[in-house]
Image: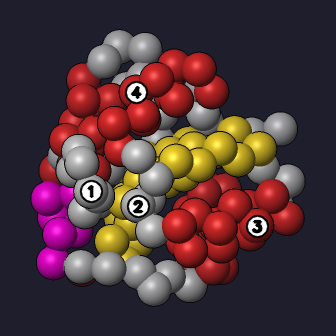
Amino acid sequence: MKKILVVDDDSSILEVLQMMLEEEHYLIETTAISEEIYQRVDDFRPDLILLDVLMTGIDGRIIARTLKQQRHTRHIPIIMLSATPTVEETARNSGGDEFVAKPFEIDVLLMLIEKYVRR
């Protein structure tokens, strides 16, 4: 079973993504606390990360850049999410493999996830 870590400071987004992805038979772990992500990545070892760009605490772009700079995490695909479409370029430049604007189409997000975890 492929593992996905979902990081977003909006609890309703976390709930929707968790339900949607569990229905697709992914093992899901979520957190709304950006400062927890590095420990969560080490403990959970996700196959993919869904990461909000504009988080309370540590900005998602800093998180993505840090993960992509570390040898043991640089291989993990990161799909960045934001309700602010103007951050797409900086999200990609910080290490995001993909960018999805909120509100997102569930089918589009599922296709992107499958692109990275069903290789």
Q: CA distance from mark 4 to mark 3?
A: 23 Å
Amino acid type assigned to the residue bearing label 1 in the image: Thr
Q: Are marks 1 and 2 in contact (CB under 8 Å)?
A: yes
Which of the two marks, 3 or 2, is nearer to us in this view? 2
The local crowd at label 3, few if under 14, some if 14 to 19, many if 20 or more residues have their Cα within 10 Å, is: few
Can you say which quadrant of the picture contains the N terminus?
top right
Q: How is the image coloured?
A: secondary structure
Q: Residue shown at 61%/36% (left/top)?
A: 47
The residue tagged 1 is: 56
34 relative to 47, above or below: below
Q: Look at the image and say whether residue 91 sits in the magenta stretch.
A: yes
Residue 9 numbered mark, or none: 2
Q: Are marks 3 and 1 in contact (CB under 8 Å)?
A: no
Residue 38 numbered mark, or none: 4
The residue tagged 3 is: 19
**Residue 94, x across and y down, in percent:** 19, 46
